[in-house]
Image (cartoon, helix red, strand yellow):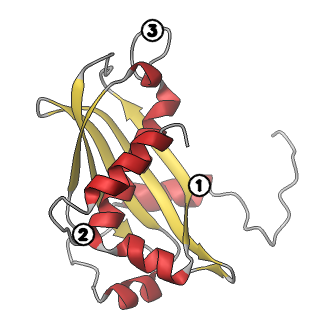
Amino acid sequence: MHAIFRLLLLIATARKRPKLSMFDLSSVPMRALLTDIDIAGHINNGMYFSLFDLGRFDLMVRSGTWDLMKKNKWTPVVQAETITFRKSVVFNQKFTQETRILGIDDKCIYFEQRMVVNGEIYVQATIATRLLSKEGPVANEEILRQLGVELPNDRVLPDWVQRWRDETALPGTRRPAPHLWR
């Protein structure tokens, strides 16, 4: 992780912030650091994904999901992500990194994440994640059961998200995925 020191600081301070439900909105105040930017003076496109990792960790820690993951030895992984850039976050600029669960399907938990400056969306991403155990993927029903929560009615995945996953997914690890350009 590019932002390892930020991650360690975030995990140490997240427990002191108000608790959240897994389905609440997490908002983390940040500033664009020298290590975040590229030669153009704005946050590097790849760095956004590392910063979005921090937002998901904040939500996991504050909702108690992180403790459950550690207890069960579950590991979070990203399966797919898509991002849209509207404006650049530049060096030393303050912003908030907003994270919420968009919805869940039979395989993934989907997050919507944003970089917001003065109430204006600069960058938005949709990220499909899973939790893995030593035996393989953890069923989302098991995660919700162990957390003692139910999926809220307002967390229905938009049609475009399901199409995006269906149209961009690689074959599962037990099926061949030959390297052939089409």
Residue 167, which numbered label? 1
**Image position of 68 with respect to 12: above or below:** below
Residue 131 in picture, x, y percent from top left: 53, 72
Residue visible at 33% across and 25% down? 32
Residue visible at 24% across and 20% down? 93
Mark 3 lies on a secondary structure that is loop
| Nearer to me, 16 or 91 | 16
Q: Quadrant of residue 36?
A: top left
Residue 125 in picture, x, y percent from top left: 39, 44
Residue 79 in picture, x, y percent from top left: 58, 58
**Image position of 121 with respect to 176: above or below:** above
Mark 2 lies on a secondary structure that is loop
Which residue type carries mark 2?
Phe
Residue 139 can be seen in this image: no
Number of numbered tags placed on the structure image: 3
**Image position of 156 with respect to 27: above or below:** below
Mark 1 lies on a secondary structure that is helix
Using residue 23 as the reference point, say whether residue 43 is left or right of it: right
Task: Give neighbour class at mark 2: few <14, some 14-19, many 20+ (Cα, 10 Å).
Answer: some
Quadrant housing the N terminus: top right
Which residue type carries mark 1?
Glu
